[in-house]
Every structure is written in structure tokens, then in C-alpha cells.
């Protein structure tokens, strides 16, 4: 063996021995490399993982971007994601940016606002409806893209007769009519601090979201229960002709819920989504009803959210009267018979110069108070497939 061959042999043996020692270290390095990889492979950066935000947050971000961009969708996208020279406001929220890019074709910068991208509207609709007693009770939502919807309903049914031998059969005929919905415009003004608009934190987004949602919920629920049905407003349950109404003239007693249930059942309804809606004052009276032996009648069941086997919800949108008896209503019915036709879920615009009524008749300037007024517009209408599917009974509360 020459000296060169001996040298090569020694180098080979040394190399193999070194590789045997460092190979486990390489495996460890590969195993944990993704923890420190800020690129596209492995785990995402902590900030990006944190962008799995709750429902409605992206809608609030969309509103804030509408304000900052003054309704220019292209500018809003730039503000959101930034570029190589400037960091964006929400650079890691890929879903928000993607939705806005898809919705670019429906931008309406001329009036300072734009349609909310459909994916964001769909994200927030459950958040909105889950807190409205009418929708949560089982009302049905139907899309009406053209702003109008007609639903045929049976007004009078066929009648059967006994027939004598060799005598002609008596004729009867079904009668139909239409439930016609025509969208009404609901406008909600939400004054928002510009400090919240400029703040990119999730907590600031949540405040903007909650303000918009609460204002929409309150108005929609009240209209569904008590709407007057004018040219510009929906018709609510209490004012729908054919709904069974009664002013009882006493405080609700232990027998009254069962009487109401019997009346509803007598209407031969499908009873698909039956439930109660009343305010917390009525709830308290029912909760405290006792037998002659001081046993609570409904308390145990009401602790499960039900009354006579049917779920109930409370809302302070049902008022207590200012009269000496404090009259208040109980709504009971098959809520699957209540139809919500929806044309536009959300459309937003914003202004930093407008004024608004603070609810007392005083006008407040958004400009002088460093505020932005976010206007949310929705278009929908309500209707009942069968009016006798609902009872509205008025009771004393004192």
C-alpha cells in the first residue's frame, strides 16, 4: 500500500466516524427547524396563526378599511396588506384581503362606500341572527335577489261531502293567495372613535363589530314583532291581520300557558318550531308561580329554557306599559311560519364629516369629535305564511 492509499484510507475512516457522531444532531436540527422557520414551510409565524379571528371581526376590519380608504376598494386592499416598502394594517389576514380582492368589481367609491364581500357577510349573519329572538326561535330566511318574493299560500281548502245515490257531487275548490315580500331599507348609523379606526388590534375590531351588530339586532327584532307595515317598514307579527290577539285583563296565571297552547293547536298547524317570546318581567312572574302548597309550578322546567315543553326566549324589546297595570305581551307560535326575505345583508359607507342625532334631538358633529360615522344598510322584509300560527296575548304585570 502506497502512502497515498494509506492517507486516503485514514481520511475515509475519520470521515465515517465523524458522520456517525453528527448525524443524530442533523436529525434533531431537521426535526425542530420548522419551529424557527419564518418562511412558507412548517408552522406559520405566531402573528399569522393569531389571524384565525372570531366571527364578525373581518366585517369590522372591512368597515375600518372603508373609512381609511374613503370607499376606494383598491386603496383599502393596499392599506390592509401593504407592500415591500410599507407594512399593511392586516398583512396576515389573507382571508380578508382575498375577499376584498374578489369584491373589487362591486366597489362604489362615488358615494364613499362599498358592498361587503359576500364571504364576510356570510360570516357575520349567524352572529347577527343568533342574538335576535325571532330568528333564533326558528324563523326561515329566504334570499330575494330582485327585492321581491311571492310565496303562494292556501286561503281556503277543499271540502268533502257525503253524497246520496244518483245525486251529483257537491263542488268545492281550493283558494290560494300570495304572501308578497318587498324589501325595505334598514339603515344603521354607528358613531365610532377614530382611535378605534386607526387601531389594528383584535380588541378594537371587536368593539366596532359589536356596535354594528347590536344596533342591527335591536331594530330588526322590534320590526319583526311590532313593525307597522308602512311603505318603508316591514309588518310585524303583532300588527299582522289574522294573528290571534287577546287582552286578558289580569296577571298571567298558572293555567294561561296551557290555554294558549290549546288555542294554537286548534289551528292545525305543522308545529315545526313552536316557542315563546316575552320579556324578563313576564319571565319572573311565571318563574315564581306556586301551587297552593307553595311548590313552584314552572321553575324547574324554566331552568332548562322551556315552558310547557317549548323553548322560550326573552327580550326587552317587548315593553312594559306605563299604565297602572304595566301591560306586556306574550308571543307564542310556530316560528317556522315567519319568513324573512333578504335582498342585501350588509352594505357599508362611512363619513368623518357628517352629523348624527344622539337620540335626544341633539346633533353631534363627527368631525369636531374626531369620530367616524359608519352606516350599515340592509334590505329585507318579513311576513307570515299563515297568520293564525301566532298568538299575541297581553297581560298585566302588576
Image (spheres, rainbow, N blue to C red):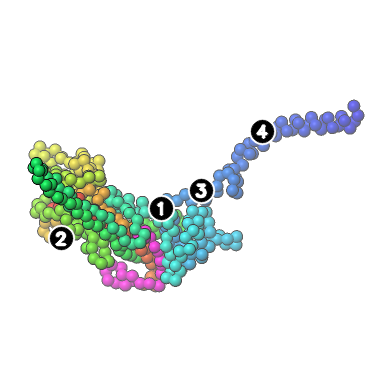
Which image quadrant for residue 294? top left
Q: Which mark is residue 49?
A: 3
Q: Which residue is mark 2?
A: 322
Q: Which residue is mark 1?
A: 123
Q: Which is more N-terminal, label 3 or label 1?
A: 3
Rendered residue at 23%/58% (across/down) = 236
Q: Is residue 366 visible?
A: yes
User: SS for tag 1?
Assistant: helix
The x and y percentages for residue 397 are: 14, 53
Q: Which is more N-terminal, label 3 or label 4?
A: 4
Q: Which mark is residue 239?
A: none
User: SS for tag 4?
Assistant: helix
Rendered residue at 43%/65% (across/down) = 114
The x and y percentages for residue 99 are: 47, 56
Q: Residues within 10 Å of mark 1 (few under 14, many from 20)?
A: some
* Magenta region, residue range: 343-364
Q: CA distance from mark 1 to mark 4?
A: 48 Å
- Name the chief secondary structure element in magenta: strand
Q: Is residue 263 visible?
A: no
Q: Is residue 352 a member of the stretch shown in magenta?
A: yes
Q: Nearer the viewer, residue 202 or 110?
A: 110
Label 1 vs label 4, nearer the camera? 1
Rendered residue at 16%/59% (across/down) = 321
Rendered residue at 35%/56% (across/down) = 143
Q: Nearer the viewer, residue 230 or 353?
A: 230
Q: Is residue 341 a member of the stretch shown in magenta?
A: no
The x and y percentages for residue 283 are: 19, 48
Q: Which is more N-terminal, label 4 or label 1?
A: 4
Label 1 vs label 3, nearer the camera? 1
Residue extending farthest front: 166
> Up-down: is 22 above or below 214?
above
Amino acid at each position: 500500500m502506497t502512502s497515498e492509499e494509506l492517507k486516503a484510507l485514514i481520511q475515509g475512516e475519520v470521515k465515517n466516524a465523524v458522520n456517525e457522531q453528527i448525524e443524530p444532531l442533523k436529525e434533531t436540527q431537521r426535526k425542530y427547524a420548522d419551529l424557527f422557520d419564518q418562511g412558507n414551510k412548517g408552522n406559520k409565524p405566531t402573528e399569522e396563526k393569531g389571524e384565525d379571528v372570531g366571527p364578525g371581526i373581518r366585517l369590522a376590519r372591512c368597515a375600518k378599511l372603508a373609512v381609511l380608504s374613503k370607499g376606494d376598494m383598491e386603496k383599502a386592499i393596499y392599506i390592509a396588506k401593504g407592500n415591500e416598502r410599507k407594512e399593511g394594517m392586516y398583512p396576515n389576514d389573507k382571508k380578508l384581503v382575498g375577499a376584498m380582492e374578489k369584491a373589487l368589481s362591486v366597489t362604489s367609491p362615488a358615494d364613499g362606500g362599498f358592498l361587503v364581500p359576500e364571504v364576510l357577510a356570510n360570516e357575520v349573519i349567524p352572529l347577527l341572527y343568533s342574538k335576535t329572538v325571532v330568528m333564533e326561535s326558528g324563523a326561515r330566511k329566504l334570499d330575494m335577489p330582485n327585492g321581491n318574493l311571492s310565496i303562494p299560500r292556501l286561503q281556503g281548502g277543499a271540502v268533502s261531502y257525503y253524497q246520496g245515490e244518483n245525486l251529483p257531487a257537491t263542488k268545492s275548490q281550493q283558494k290560494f293567495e300570495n304572501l308578497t315580500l318587498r324589501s325595505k331599507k334598514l339603515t344603521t348609523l354607528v358613531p365610532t372613535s377614530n382611535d378605534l379606526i386607526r387601531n389594528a388590534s383584535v380588541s378594537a375590531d371587536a368593539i366596532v363589530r359589536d356596535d354594528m351588530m347590536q344596533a342591527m339586532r335591536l331594530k330588526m327584532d322590534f320590526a319583526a314583532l311590532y313593525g307597522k307595515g308602512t311603505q318603508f317598514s316591514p309588518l310585524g307579527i303583532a300588527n299582522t291581520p289574522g294573528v290571534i290577539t287577546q287582552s286578558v285583563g289580569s296577571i298571567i296565571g298558572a293555567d294561561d300557558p296551557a290555554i294558549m297552547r290549546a288555542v294554537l293547536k286548534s289551528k292545525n298547524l305543522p308545529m315545526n318550531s313552536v316557542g315563546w317570546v316575552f320579556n324578563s318581567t313576564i319571565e319572573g312572574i311565571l318563574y315564581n308561580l306556586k301551587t297552593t302548597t307553595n311548590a313552584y309550578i314552572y321553575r324547574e322546567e324554566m331552568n332548562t329554557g322551556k315552558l310547557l315543553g317549548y323553548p322560550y326566549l326573552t327580550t326587552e324589546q317587548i315593553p312594559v306599559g306605563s299604565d297602572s297595570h304595566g301591560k306586556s305581551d306574550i308571543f307564542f307560535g310556530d316560528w317556522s311560519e315567519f319568513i324573512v326575505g333578504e335582498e342585501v345583508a350588509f352594505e357599508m359607507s362611512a363619513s368623518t364629516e357628517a352629523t348624527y342625532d344622539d337620540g335626544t334631538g341633539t346633533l353631534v358633529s363627527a368631525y369636531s369629535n374626531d369620530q367616524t360615522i359608519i352606516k350599515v344598510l340592509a334590505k329585507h322584509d318579513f311576513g307570515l305564511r299563515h297568520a293564525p300560527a301566532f298568538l299575541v296575548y297581553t297581560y298585566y304585570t302588576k
